[in-house]
């Protein structure tokens, strides 16, 4: 009985996760047409005047959903690193199939990834060309 209950909870978790991911994706695909655009300014940007690593991420995700790769890149290049990793991890969670190698979670991968994100954060706030290309539109 206990094992059956655990399997039921796991299945409910997977279904809920899939529904949430689909709802968020549909929202970002359609949100301008729905008439309510998320108009929250980044708190980090508001407090410091600097761009965080996520600034422009929502616009980049929306642009990617519509196939506008250049527009996505102009808003936040980091989306091209983050979205594939998030998508693969979500696929693993929902399907229970291992896709990402366990080595991905090692310090050899995580530390360079964190360093890359920090460098991106610093470079996009340097007010000189070519770094100004990293500022979201």
Image (cartoon, grey):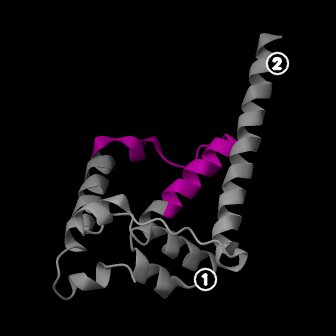
Tell me whether the residue at label 2 lies in contact with that at label 1, contact meaning CB atoms closer than 8 angstroms: no
Please tell me whether the stretch drawn in magenta is mainly helix, strand or loop. Answer: helix
Q: Residues within 10 Å of mark 2 (few under 14, many from 20)?
A: few
Find numbered disc 1 in the image and state the secondary structure of the residue it sits on: loop
Point out residue 131 in the picture as x, y percentages from the top left corner. 22, 81
Tell me the quarter of the picture where residue 48 sits: bottom left
Check residue 67 in the rendering and tell me which mark sits there, or answer none.
1
130 relative to 99 in the view: left or right: left
Q: Quadrant of the N terminus?
A: top right
Residue 84 within the segment the image draws in magenta: yes
Q: Which residue is mark 2?
A: 4
Which of the two residues, 47 or 76, is positioned nearer the viewer here? 47
Residue drawn 63% across the image and 81% down it: 66
Q: What whole-number distance in Å separates the C-alpha atoms at marks 2 and 1?
A: 43 Å
Q: Of helix, strand and loop, which one carries label 2?
A: helix
Residue 52 visible from this viewpoint: no
- Measured from the top left, where is residue 31 in percent x and y? 66, 72
The magenta stretch spans which residues?
Answer: 83-107
Q: Residue at x 65, y 78 (%)?
A: 32
Can you give x and y, in whole percent of width and height, for residue 132 in the image?
A: 25, 84
Relative image position of residue 18 (x, y in whole percent): 72, 49
């Amino acid at each position: 009985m206990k094992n059956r209950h655990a399997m039921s909870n796991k299945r409910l978790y997977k279904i809920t996760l899939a529904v949430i991911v689909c709802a968020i994706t549909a929202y970002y695909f359609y949100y301008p047409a729905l008439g309510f655009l998320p108009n929250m300014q980044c708190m980090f940007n508001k407090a410091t005047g600097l761009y965080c690593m996520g600034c422009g991420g929502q616009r980049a995700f929306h642009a990617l959903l519509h196939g506008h790769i250049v527009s996505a890149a102009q808003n936040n290049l980091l989306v091209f690193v983050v979205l594939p990793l998030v998508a693969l991890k979500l696929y693993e969670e929902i399907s229970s199939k291992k896709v990402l190698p366990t080595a991905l979670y090692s310090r050899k991968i995580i530390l360079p990834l964190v360093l890359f994100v920090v460098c991106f954060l610093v470079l996009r706030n340097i007010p000189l060309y070519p770094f100004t290309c990293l500022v979201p539109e």
